Amino acid sequence: MISKTKCATFTLTPLKLGETDSTLSQQAVAKTSRSPCCYLLASVLRLNIQDHHLLLLLLLVSQAGWRESVIILTVEAQRNMGSFILRKMELVKSWADAFGEELYSIVTKYSGSLLLQKKYKDVEPTLKIKEVDGLELVKKFSEQMESMLRRKVEAVERLVEAAEDADLNHEYNSSLEFDYYNSLLINEKDENDNYVELGDEFILEPNEHFNNLLVNTTYSDIQLPTNVYNKDPDILNGVYMSEALNPIFVDNFERDPTLTWQYFGSSTGFFRLYPGIKWLPDENGVISFDCRNRGWYIQAATSPKDIVIIVDVSGSMKGLRMTIAKHTIITILDTLGENDFVNIIAYNDYVHFIEPCFKGILVQADRDNREHFKQLVDELQAKGVGTVNKALTESFKILREFRDAGQGGLCNQAIMLITDGAVEDYEAVFEKYNWPDRKVRVFTYLIGREVTFAPNVKWIACNNKGYYTQISTLADVQENVMEYLHVLSRPMVINHDHDIIWTEAYMDSAAQSLLLMTTVAMPVFSKKNETRSHGILLGVVGSDVPLRELLKLAPRYKLGVHGYAFLNTNNGYILSHPDLRPLYKEGKKLKPKPNYNSVDLSEVEWEDQDEILRTAMINGETGYLSMDVKVPVDKGKRVLFLTNDYFFTDISGTPFSLGVVLSRGHGEYILLGNTSVEEGLHDLLQPDLSLANEWIYCITDIDPDHRKLSQLEAVIRFLTGEEPDLECDEELVQEVLFDAVVTAPMEAYWTTLALNMSMETEAGVEMAFLGTRAGLMRSALYVGSEKLSNRKFLTRKDKESIFTMDHFPLWYRRAAEHPPGSFIYSIVSEDDSGNLSLNTRGEKRKVFTYSFQCHAYPNPFIATLAQWELLRSSLMAFAVGVQIKLELLQRKFWMAMQQVGAPAITQRQFNLPRRWLHCSILTACLSCFDPRVTMYDYQAMCKIPYHHHSGARPLLSVCISLFLLEFNMSSFWHSDNLADAHKHKKHDTLQPCDTEYPVFVYEPAIKETNGLIECGDCQKMFVAQQIASSNLLLLVTDAACDCNIFPPVLLDAKEVKYILLLCDRMRSQKLRRRPDTCHAFHPEENAQDCGGAAELSVSLTLLLLPLALLLR
């Protein structure tokens, strides 16, 4: 009994077998809700093909989400023959069955799946299956990560000790003359071919360990920002003193070859970097990098802080003064991080919070809030009369309320007063709110050249444990703002507390790398007794740790097909996660997203609606949680429905937590085979075999002699004893040996097939391949490599098709989630010719993938069939497949029709113009599959038109081509609107946003359906039949009725707007864990060292020098 097909946007009547045309015309039509096949049929049947043509469509669907293809096959039939066939549903079913058998026969034959299944069955009695204890696994990974990170801390501690000892033994010399390696000037010559001053010869060589950059591993060099004079006495003395770090840098690297960049950032502005590199200015010839603005420097130099910035916006602040004040605020904001809290108050005749939503509170100084404040600061205007008392009162109240409520940073508290003068009697405010304890420091910034009010403004700072500066020009801002950091560091320096800090994830701009890093850093203090009460901070020492190095300690093969490991910080931000997408494309250039290092765990694991996982991990707990999740794969084009087990614990000595995810059905067990080294080694040497080069079978990145070895070469040298010093994962190597032996017969099998192929009946089979859980892959070509439809497949150019650190191949993952015995067809990425690829995957206690492409059609296919289940567990041991051309698929379809009988029908090449295939065909097809699932992307990038503050970028249109249509959902998930970034209008910009988009999931219970669609003046009949053991649906309809009246079903991602809840969202404070230490005050600090009269800064001198030369 065929259930009635329902639709919302049009009327649809089911067609019962044996009904006559007159019966059809008299049937009642019901308007009902949307359900399977409605939109598909309505939209596909919009094709206005001549009425003597019968339209047959192969629809590629998937339980993992529809995004596939419609293969359009047209046949020529006699008039009214189409109606006859449509009423003969058994005939359509026979076509589907015959075609399904042909497909199954081809794929099993050329993939060798049956042979491989037998080989694994033969060795099953010798296999061992080890159950995975998720908690023990995450604890083990955490201990290994802790050990690795501890070695980095020890390296930094040695540098701190050396720097402080060097300073203790150094006598300041104001007339010191000293040449050093300036990273900007090294190897530079003048017109006489002589090295310029500070630019002597500095040998640089490429080094794989440092991203193949040109470096000098025997010496460090010095970088300075453009606004710091490279011969300043303070700079020369600091550089001379820090020369003592060179041998420590080298020794550290020899002790721990996994170390990357080591450096010392001085409080005077110079940056000593090891290994030494050539520093290049930006496109404007400026070096803007200032180590003192970096997060690692600021976090190490100070404890968490609550800051209220008060800015005078009275009429006297107009013009240059307001410009300087705004720049001062922005510079202060740049010194804040995720452990700090802030708000900004503007005052003139009245007091107002520049963001009304933040009235009366402090907000976390994360990237989003800092950028939001900067936009508001830019809009400030000067007018009225300034009265500072009310602003000070409001600030003290906020700070006291947060302190008493246990909110904010719970450490340093400070007010930053930016004004051009203060004439009121404000002493009463300090007596009421801050004296005698002086828990809140007050820093004052006098704007402009006038000194009339300097004594008053300085008095405010000196009587509240703060610091006073006068800022006369924009060039003064940077150095004067930095003074407050030195004051806040005094208690820590006097107490000699060397706190170890770890930063959030960031990209290494110094090394010109897009790799995510974290930094371990420690402050460096002056130990001289005569300066003890001044608490002099010399600088900060740090070392970078690539996050990929940490994740290497959580090997992919131990986590299963869908498993993964991830890291987050005490603030809940992601350090590393396979779904973190930190980059977007602008033109052809990859760039970091503005908020790439403040993506919250709840924005990636968004199924954790109650934030149970997030809360536990931030609190450093050890535990377990299970969740049903929807996982986007293939760049968001599909979604997998999984039950994931989350195991988590903290990493001791750091603010980080580690999570390990094991997916039910694939992560509970590990397969252990047993074979001899001799037998396995023989099979490893076969030419068709390769290993996942991103996996760590053997450690090859420490010894320089090993770095050029592939993982396969390293394993072979380890097994043969050629490299006894190689350290290898013996369990993984054993699994590889076992898989190599079991899969070895495939080489001979594929070779025999290739030699005996019939190019008449089986032309179009291009490649066979397989992959195993141990990361082993084999492949064989049935055609010359130059004839391959998709040459990127199984290469590094198509990372989705190979084993990487982040994931198993896509064809392997998708096959794992489909019923045993079925084939999965899908479209893969474009190749260099602009062609698309189709994949087919299936599972029947085995896995195989095959791909097909027809030169007459613009798209290549790939198909996979995969899964082998053991008796005691559902363990996927291997995947195997073939790649074939689309024309072979078409040819086999016509053969199947002729075998079962297709009266009065002849094959016809129907050159359908692109304009006939309306985009709505594909969007409508998606609604064939219920339920409709809403997915969210909290890492999207939306186009913001010039002078417009909202609106998401429209998604790419459906890709339409003859015989093959692809709907590319990646345009609203993975690409972050990357694809057309270079086509934006000149003033259009992209900014982070949240989006939601629909995914349509195939319902496998729908095996067949038929019916009528009311298309205004006519009715269109259809029959839909699932093709067995595949994700194909065969749709047959006549084309006598024009159904263009139905609108397309749009699948655009939509930006999520928070208009009504905007203030609530902005004010909300997510759970976070504060740093363990706090250094707010010290009884011995010299509070009278609180600033002095303004002086012309070095930076101003530098800026005026070019002007003076020009005037000459």
Image (spheres, rainbow, N blue to C red):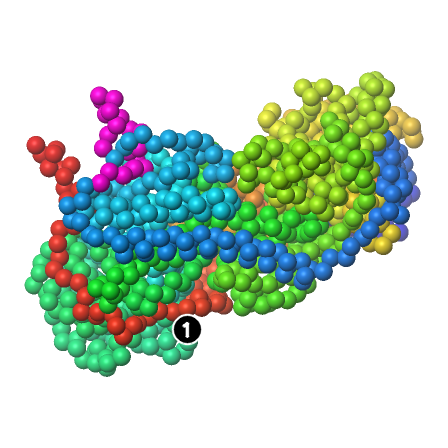
Q: Residue 360 magenta-drawn?
A: no
- Residue 893: give x, y in percent of width and height: 83, 29
Question: Which residue in the rendered view is the most extreme toward the top?
Answer: 760
Q: Identify the image quadrant of the C terminus.
A: top left
Pick the front one: 512 or 75: 512
Q: Residue 190 magenta-drawn?
A: yes
Circle 1 Cα neighbour tier, 10 Å, few/some/many (<14 / 14–19 / ≥20)? some
Q: Splitting the image into 4 quarters, where does residue 884 fall?
A: top right
Check the image and report above or below for 143 versus 680.
below
Q: Residue at x 50, y 38 (%)?
A: 209
Q: Residue at x 67, y 58 (%)?
A: 137
Q: Splitting the image into 4 quarters, where does residue 1110 fall?
A: top left
Residue 714 visible from this viewpoint: no
Pick the front one: 375 or 260: 260
Q: Residue at x 78, y 48 (%)?
A: 672
Magenta range is: 178-197
388 horizontally vs 367: left or right: left
Predominant secondary structure in magenta?
loop
Pick the front one: 986 or 728: 728
